[in-house]
Image (tube, grey):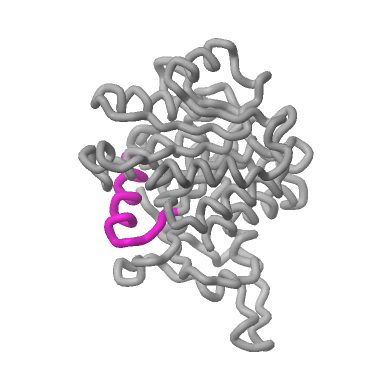
Amino acid sequence: MLIPANSADMVLRDDSDEGPAALRVHQVVSPFSPEAAKGSSVLVGFCSDLGVVANSGRPGAKDAPSALRRQLYNFAYNGPRKILDLGDVVADQGGGLAQMQEELSSVIRSVLRMGGRPVVIGGGHEVAWGSWQGIRGHLGDDLLRSKRVAIVNLDAHFDIRSIPIPSSGTPFFQIATSLFDSRLAFNYICLGVSEVSNTAVLFQRAEQWGVEYVLDREMQNFDDSLISDILDRFDLIYLSVDFDVLPPWSMGAVSAPSTFGVPMAVVDAVIETLVASQKVISIDFAEFNPSFDRDSLYARSASRLVMTALR
């Protein structure tokens, strides 16, 4: 089910006595409305860690949307895009992961149809299957054949495992096989891949499918030419960000911490450059786990990246 975001239990800073240019996110964000959607960034929470548990990860990511909103709402707002908050997709009584993903898919289709750009806060990386179903449902297969559409995933993991139970480790396998079944291209680019976090069979599958990837150790500095090349080759981009792409010392509050990682400044620059191109149609963030945070430090870092995506 979809429930409204609730800021009632948040401690929110107010500097508005300094004037209209001293506003924070909580003072400019509005509840979602169809009339305001066009040209807006639309926050959506996906409160699931069912896929993480199925993938033998550490549970707790279902609480990420509220933890990140608590930080995000207090950030200074410098525009330019309007921000709407549509609320959270949560599990129905007795409902499972597939039902949540279908509901997220429906939400994303609606937001895209109204001209908004979804910014989804997971939850485990099972969020990606729900996101993609919504994107594909909106675009339609004819457009997927005529336009060059890329999936860019900032992640230590390929997430193309083939285990029979869908999980946080299978979303891009699910996306790939669904596209192959329809004879559509799977344009998947994974940035920040860890050699020690992906088995040989995953690298073999990535090679077989023509997956483009860059290892974490090769992304220690921002390479503008890498992102420019992606933007030159593709018309539309679905951007997914798994917080475990970051180094463990700057992001330990995730389901499966990295062993090396891509510096936050590089991840931020990649997000900023892609979003500024106006080619990104939908974004999701995954795997933040507030159960392992320290004084909300990791939540602040994660929310900073979400803020970059909202601009």
Numbered-mark total: 0
The stretch in magenta equals 102-118
Which quarter of the figure has residue 244?
top right
Which quarter of the figure has residue 248?
top right
Q: Looking at the image, can residue 187 be seen?
A: yes
- Horizontal side of 244 relative to 188 (left or right) equals right
At 54% from the left and 32% from the top, the residue drawn is 190
Q: Where does residue 154 sit, x and y in percent of width and height?
A: 57, 38
Q: State yes or no: residue 97 in magenta.
A: no
Q: Where does residue 127 sit, x and y in percent of width and height?
A: 45, 39
At 26% from the left and 22% from the top, the residue drawn is 181
At 72% from the left and 42% from the top, the residue drawn is 221
Residue nearer the viewer, 104 or 189: 189
Q: Looking at the image, can residue 252 be seen?
A: no
Q: Where does residue 306 sit, x and y in percent of width and height?
A: 57, 54
Q: Main secondary structure of the magenta part?
A: helix
Q: State yes or no: residue 113 in magenta.
A: yes
- Horizontal side of 2 relative to 192 (left or right) equals left
Which quarter of the figure has residue 77?
bottom right
- Horizontal side of 151 relative to 251 (left or right) equals left
At 51% from the left and 58% from the top, the residue drawn is 276
